[in-house]
Image (cartoon, rainbow, N blue to C red):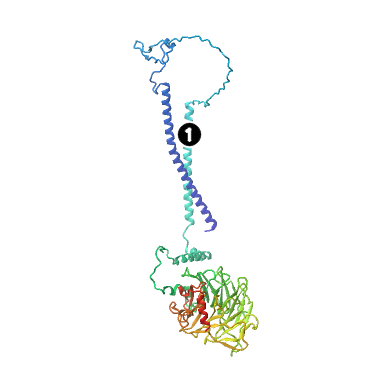
Amino acid sequence: MSEQRRQQIEEKKAKLEALRIARLDRQKRSRVSGAADAPAAAAREHEKVDMDRVLDDILGTSSSGKGTPLNAFSSSGRNSPASNFPLERGSPRPPYAVSSGSTDHIIEREMTPRPVLDLIDIQQDLFELPQKRRTLYEKEIQTVEAEAEAPEDVEDKIRQQLIMQQTQEAERIAYEQALEEEAAKLDQEIELEVRELSEEERAIFLSDPKVLDFVDDSTKIFHRVLNDHYNYMSDYTQGTESGGDDSEGRRVKRVCEFWSERYGKNRSITDVDWSPKFPELTVASYNKNHAAFNEPAGIVAVWNTHSVERPEFVFHSQSDVVSVMFSPFHSNLIFGGTYSGQILLWDNRSKHLPVLKTPLSAAGHTHPVYAIQMVGTQNAHNLITSSTDGTVCSWLVDMLAQPQETLELIHAGHNKTGEVAITALDFPNNETTTFWVGTEEGNVYQANRYDRAGAKAGLNQYDVYKGHSGPVMGLHFHPIAGPVDFSDLFLTSSVDWTIKLWRAKSLAKPSTTPQSITPLLSFDEADDYVYDVKWHPQHPALFGTVDGSGKFDLWNLNTDTEVPVVSTIVGSGRAINKLEWNKDGRHAALGGSDGRLYVYDIGDVAASRGEVEWSEMQKIVSV
């Protein structure tokens, strides 16, 4: 149905409704006016009877003409002689007497002589006083002289009124009939227009991109509401005593598990990250599904902790996505490093494909990009990426056609090749120039982006952090600033089943001869590859690890340096590849090799005792 036709139908519906409302109003007014005229007619009739009664009282006659007037006359038409004599003051008026003679029409009265007044002469002095002017006011009643109408005129008026009422009634009936016909016609047109779609029309409608977007957005909202686990029946008047044991707050509990058979089947999660702006959003990158040739090789899914059944956004890649991160300065942007060496940029306001990507050329990376990191500030920042061919590139976010800087990390001590295969990279807190890299050979090296005092750009050839006997899978510097400066401490994890704690050598005193630096502490409790390690963002002595046996371990150096304080088996026991803390350190996102993303709440494990934690940590690392 066209938009114009739909608008016409809506206008007709509105017109029909207005006509119906007008008809109901007229019917209501007619009923009200009819009910109001009846009392008025009764009132007028009552007033007429009262008026007749008053007139009868005044004239002394009844409506039937019976009765006798007060001042009767004799048969001769003259007044009785006795009427010429006044009555004495206070004397009663004699009653009237009716004779019983032969003549019935003669009325006889008993007359009393009027007393004669005596006149007395009195001599008095007369004075002429000024005549007082008298102001006279005349009151007049203005009335309209009623003209008596002839009976023929009254009949004509009544006849005209009847004819007018009949004409109005006929017009009203005709109008209502026309209204009913119009309503029936409109209903018929609406029934013809609003009809059942055919299979072909339904298929075309459901394949419309606008319809798909509307359905997708609406179902996301419904999923968020249905997955809200807030207890609406909570009784806040009850006491807080639960009777639980003291260790209840120290348990690690799973908050949710993100899984979609469509996107996660036969895939593994290669990296995870939390949104810096929306604490409920987390992103995961997936490798290739070798059983599905028609699906994209790499997938990036943004999940919402309020909607676990489906991801908020899904982005595609032509190659496996092995690293991913939210932009810390633009909440809509997501960066990913691929197995082919491309750097991709997705925007959640756009579709599934990347909005920007680096070319597959020697100007950028040609090997897997396992480490990406953003350094700088809101107004001046760069994306730093590294690949297993020893190349470190610096990119501007809005220009991925070519890197702004390219750095080749080469070590002269390597036998077969001078390249350093980078598997992990990290910058110390508030540092943008010097960084450390973990390599496939198990060593950790320090490198510089630019020349600085006493050190050249590139790999530091002299300082080698030796301790692992296998590839370094995770590297993380201490992120917290506090009473004691621990920014030179970093952790590494390796496939040799160990975690190492290191102290970075001071940049102010670079070495001029080869030196081997050993770790401060080694944690050998794991029974499988340790794929990742991360310091806690709030507690100075707490860090977490994940390994190939599916364990999520929490270590507190102030409590124990031999065994973790809490060890949890995640999911079905499949390997956990990545670990990432959210901003407040309450939740940890764990990416599994089974394609499932887990979110765990660590409870009160990360509760800090203040500066005591820092001082105890300083004693441990100073041994």
For residue 389, say whether it is visible: no
Which is nearer the eye, 445 or 555? 555
Q: Position of residue 566 (x, y in %)?
A: 44, 78
Q: Position of residue 580 (x, y in %)?
A: 51, 75
Which is nearer the eye, 284 or 36? 284
Residue behind mark 1: 161
State the image quarter where residue 35 is shown. Answer: top left
Determine crowd level at label 1: few under 14, some 14-19, many 20+ residues with C-alpha closer than 10 A. Answer: few
Which is nearer the eye, 234 or 521? 521
> SS for tag 1?
helix
Q: Position of residue 555 (x, y in %)?
A: 48, 79
Which is nearer the eye, 606 or 526? 606
For residue 169, say whether it is visible: yes
Q: Position of residue 134 (x, y in %)?
A: 57, 21
State the image quarter where residue 229 is shown. Answer: bottom left
How many numbered marks, from 0 up?
1
What kind of residue is marked 1?
Answer: Gln
Task: Give left or right: position of 605 versus 105.
Answer: right
Give the vertical position of 335 relative to 45 (above or below).
below
Which residue is at the far bottom?
415
